[in-house]
Image: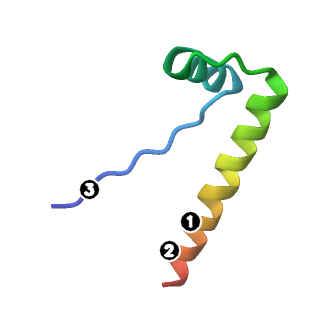
């Protein structure tokens, strides 16, 4: 059985909303941008590593 993987864009507003609802943490737009940048970098590294195996 093949697993379907879905990747969708996440906005800065969605990151702010998730942190507020799940953790009760109020993020600034700059903090949310930093988190988005980190997640993007982590995804790129993971995909590159997967493809090299």
Q: Residues within 10 Å of mark 3 (few under 14, many from 20)?
A: few
| Mark 1 in CB contact with mark 2 (< 8 angstroms) | yes
Residue 2 vs residue 33, the one in the foreground? 33
Real-space Cα distance between discs 1 and 2? 6 Å
Give the residue pinned by disc 1.
Answer: 46
Q: Residues within 10 Å of mark 1 (few under 14, many from 20)?
A: few
Question: Can you say which quadrant of the picture contains the N terminus?
Answer: bottom left
For mark 2, give the secondary structure: helix
As drawn, 46 above or below 49: above
Q: Residue at 63% x, 57% y: name it.
A: 42
In this rendering, position of residue 52 left or right of residue 42:
left
**Residue 6 x/y as whole percent:** 41, 45
Res. 29 mark = none
| Mark 3 in CB contact with mark 2 (< 8 angstroms) | no
Real-space Cα distance between discs 3 and 2? 16 Å
**Residue 35 x/y as whole percent:** 71, 39
Give the residue pinned by disc 3.
Answer: 3
Label located before the other in sequence (3 or 1): 3
Q: Residue at 64% x, 19% y: name it.
A: 25
Pair 3/2: label in front: 2
Q: Residues within 10 Å of mark 2 (few under 14, many from 20)?
A: few
Q: Residue at 56% x, 75% y: name it.
A: 49
Real-space Cα distance between discs 3 and 1? 18 Å
Give the residue pinned by disc 2.
Answer: 50
| Mark 3 in CB contact with mark 1 (< 8 angstroms) | no
- Looking at this view, name the residue that lies furthest to the right: 30
In this rendering, position of residue 11 left or right of residue 46:
right
**Residue 40 x/y as whole percent:** 67, 50
């Amino acid at each position: 059985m093949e697993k379907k993987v879905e990747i969708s864009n996440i906005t800065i507003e969605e990151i702010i909303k998730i942190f507020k609802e799940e953790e009760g943490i109020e993020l600034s737009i700059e903090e949310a941008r930093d988190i988005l940048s980190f997640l993007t970098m982590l995804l790129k590294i993971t995909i590159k590593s997967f493809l090299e195996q």
